[in-house]
Image: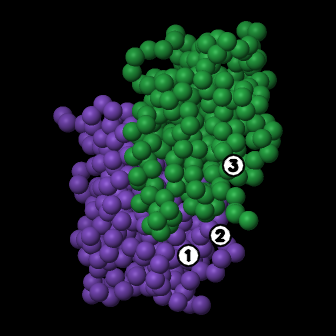
Chain colours: A green, B purple
Amino acid sequence: MLEKKRAVVLLSGGLDSATVLAIAKNSGYECYVLSFDYGQRSLTELNAARRVSESLHVADHRVLRLNLEDFGGSALTDHSLQMPEEGEQPGIPLTYVPARNTVFLSLALGWAEVLDAQAIFIGVNAVDYSGYPDCRPEFIKAFQDMAALATRQGVEGQPIRIETPLINLTKAEIIRQGLALGLNYAATVSCYQADDEGRACGRCDSCRLRAKGFADAGVADPTLYSPR
Amino acid sequence: MLEKKRAVVLLSGGLDSATVLAIAKNSGYECYVLSFDYGQRSLTELNAARRVSESLHVADHRVLRLNLEDFGGSALTDHSLQMPEEGEQPGIPLTYVPARNTVFLSLALGWAEVLDAQAIFIGVNAVDYSGYPDCRPEFIKAFQDMAALATRQGVEGQPIRIETPLINLTKAEIIRQGLALGLNYAATVSCYQADDEGRACGRCDSCRLRAKGFADAGVADPTLYSPR
């Protein structure tokens, strides 16, 4: 019998990464799920990650604590900065967390190396990418090239692949794919400032993109919004 | 007046990274020092990092906690594995920590981005590199290329440089350079399994390389060895 192929899947608990996990599972991977507690305002996202991991019966789910808030510089982790609510603006937004995907992929790479995993899955998206430099295909390609030189597997001829199944999809296409795989989006939380009950604000960039995705897909939005 | 240029310097508390810090400082950088508490056996290394940072009057020194031991796979973090003491062997050694330099450089990159630093200094060495894939020049080059695509600075045309002043030096040359800069090597700890008083075992790969370096440089070895 062939050994099951393994993947490390980065899961925030939001819509995109939950869809990625469903896709990785559907592709036959044994999924090792990695989430980060990095001082993000919304801890309800991590609770969502736990719910999604449980419902998809993953092989393992780990939450790594990272003090990224010590570095400052982002409205997602620095509570002294005002969360932008005025819709999309030109340039790199204040919600950008410095080198976040680089850091997350690097830690996924370490675990993937120990697990002897063939792939790392990440839910970056170049369509609704919100201006973050580390969501672009050229960044992912450069990370994969670097990873091939960084690891035991790479040196021994089997570099780890970085899989980005959402990279060219619109939010509506992502949602349709998740629904086709039976994903329950009510369990996911995308809001940058969800309340303690996991209810979304409906005003931040992430909420706007998500709501538009459900509207464009022509399906009902299952998101719980805060009455505020 | 010109603003002082800034660098993030990775410091373990060992001989190499302490020398790198002295070099960065001597090159006119305001130094922001980053160390990691990643479940390494030798916490005395971190105490050494604090001593070295203080004596060199750095701008800031942060110690980030990282649960790399959760991933397992290395004699440096997995206490169930036997530390190799039989001298250098072919292949990648058991003391290799999966993706360590990738993870450390990624976190340094995040801080560098917030600080608007021009460079990250790391003490990798391709001469005495002990078989770690992430100590090779081609890895460093690939990381720098990736970082240029990952960050705000890179997008805006000022990519962060990864500086590796030790990469082509022998241990003896490193030691001579540090001594010329006034570095006190008695404050550094290189041993993979130093005791609580910071005394070295004298038998692990790291102790062997260090002792040979002082011998080759023709200077007295200031290392405190355990009487065991």
Residue A20 image offset from top left, x and y in percent: 63, 37
Q: CA distance from mark 3 to mark 2?
A: 30 Å
Residue B24 falls in image quadrant: bottom left
Judge left or right: residue B93 versus residue A116: left
Q: CA distance from mark 2 to mark 1?
A: 10 Å
Residue position marked by numbered label 2 in the rendering: B78
Q: CA distance from mark 3 to mark 1?
A: 31 Å
Residue position marked by numbered label 3 in the rendering: A28
Residue type of the residue flagged with mark 1? Leu
> Which mark sits nearer the N-terminus, 2 or 1?
2
**Tag 3 and tag 2, C-beta contact below 8 Å:** no
Task: Find residue B94 and name its label.
Answer: 1
Residue at figure coordinates x 41%, y 53% from the top left? A146
**Tag 3 and tag 1, C-beta contact below 8 Å:** no
Residue B107 image offset from top left, x and y in percent: 48, 48
Residue at figure coordinates x 25%, y 67% from the top left? B181
| Rendered view: A210 above or below A76 | above
